[in-house]
Image: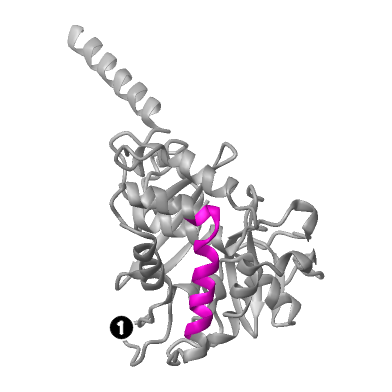
């Protein structure tokens, strides 16, 4: 009788322990999907939106830094983005939500219904816009950088490196020993973002760059879009009649959106990007995440809200960088 009682107690304790850990990532980071748990603790949970609430804190924490709190740094990058457009400068119309099982055009109007283009004449924006016609979006088509295009890249790097946002990033990376000078920083940005590489091992030519993929967008195939994670590139595509917005593909996020759309006959279910931010901010925060959390979830905190960013590496270059959740 006593043995039966002990067995019942142990079984009850096991059940209670499992219940208490059901929503925890303790000892579960990186574990595969387990339907016994109500939430998951692996990188795929970001895709399926079933992460435990403490996933970022427990499973993606970086080693403590003597150069300042990571959350404070990301907030400072945002606060220093003086070139970011104000809410009154941009009007969006999200319209209907597009589901993964019903990928169709549910938005009769554009995503961007108004942008004050007088705010796009500053050096940071004008040098960015000058780069957009430098790329062939077709995968496997070789990219060739001419002397004039190289000069445009240099002008853009000069522009963003002069911003308070990039200077704050430099201070942090310099403290961490990642760069020794602004010249080092410039070389790092050029290597990560502008050096050409092969997106696929089967490609016979240098056909892409981090900047093209993230900040301009490219085609994955004759039917699918790849990349495009900057709001102004999307706006320019809509304005030029090349992009047809289908609707938003995830719940509204703080200062960001997930867009479903068609670009010159090619479609993408979910393209996430910040809204109204300058290219200096996006390049800074993605570079930071690439450096500190390469191929991991990068918890960026803006005005008290966590925005999880994911970056991937290919041959030492930015393969992609985007808002994951």
* The magenta stretch spans residue 67: no
Q: Main secondary structure of the magenta part?
A: helix
- Image coordinates of residue 209 in percent, x first then y, are 43, 78
Q: Is residue 133 left or right of residue 36?
A: right
The image quarter in which residue 313 lies: bottom left
Q: Is residue 175 visible?
A: yes
- Image coordinates of residue 162 in percent, x first then y, are 53, 61
Farthest residue, direction left: 3
Q: Nearer the viewer, residue 208 or 146?
A: 146
Helix or strand or loop: what does disc 1 sit on? loop
Q: Is residue 95 left or right of residue 217?
A: right
Question: Is 242 situated above or below 124?
Answer: below
Give me the residue at 29% from left, 23% from top: 14
Q: Is residue 293 visible?
A: no
Q: Nearer the viewer, residue 102 or 136?
A: 136
Question: Is 226 situated above or below 168?
Answer: below
Question: Is 253 situated above or below 316?
Answer: above
Q: Residues within 10 Å of mark 1 (few under 14, many from 20)?
A: few
* The magenta stretch spans residue 164: yes
Give me the residue at 32% from left, 37% from top: 66
- Image coordinates of residue 252 in percent, x first then y, are 66, 50
Q: Which residues are magenta?
A: 150-166
Q: Which residue is mark 1?
A: 201
């Amino acid at each position: 009788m006593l043995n039966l009682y002990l067995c019942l107690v142990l079984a009850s304790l096991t059940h209670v322990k499992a219940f208490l850990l059901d929503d925890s990532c303790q000892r579960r980071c990186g574990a595969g999907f387990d339907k016994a748990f109500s939430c998951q603790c692996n990188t795929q949970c970001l895709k399926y939106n079933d992460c435990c609430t403490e996933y970022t804190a427990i499973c993606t924490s970086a080693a403590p830094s003597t150069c300042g709190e990571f959350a404070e740094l990301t907030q400072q990058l945002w606060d220093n983005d003086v070139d970011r457009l104000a809410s009154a400068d941009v009007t969006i119309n999200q319209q209907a939500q597009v589901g993964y099982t019903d990928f169709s055009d549910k938005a009769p109007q554009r995503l961007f219904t108004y942008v004050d283009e007088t705010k796009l004449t500053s050096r940071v924006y004008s040098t960015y816009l000058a780069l957009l016609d430098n790329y062939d979006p077709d995968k496997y088509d070789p990219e060739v950088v001419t002397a004039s295009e190289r000069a445009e890249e240099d002008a853009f790097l000069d522009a963003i490196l002069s911003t308070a946002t990039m200077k704050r990033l430099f201070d942090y990376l310099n403290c961490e020993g990642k760069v020794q000078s602004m010249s080092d920083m410039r070389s790092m940005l050029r290597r990560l973002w502008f050096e050409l590489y092969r997106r696929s091992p089967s490609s016979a030519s240098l056909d892409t760059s981090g900047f093209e993929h993230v900040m301009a967008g490219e085609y994955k195939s004759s039917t699918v879009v790849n990349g495009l994670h900057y709001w102004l590139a999307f706006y320019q595509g809509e304005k030029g009649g090349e992009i047809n917005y289908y609707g938003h593909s995830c719940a509204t996020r703080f200062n960001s959106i997930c867009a479903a759309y068609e670009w010159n006959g090619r479609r993408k279910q979910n393209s996430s990007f910040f809204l109204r931010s300058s290219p200096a901010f996006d390049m800074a925060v993605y570079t930071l995440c690439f450096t500190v959390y390469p191929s991991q979830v990068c918890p960026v905190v803006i005005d008290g809200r966590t925005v999880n960013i994911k970056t991937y590496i290919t041959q030492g270059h930015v393969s992609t960088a985007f808002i994951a959740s």
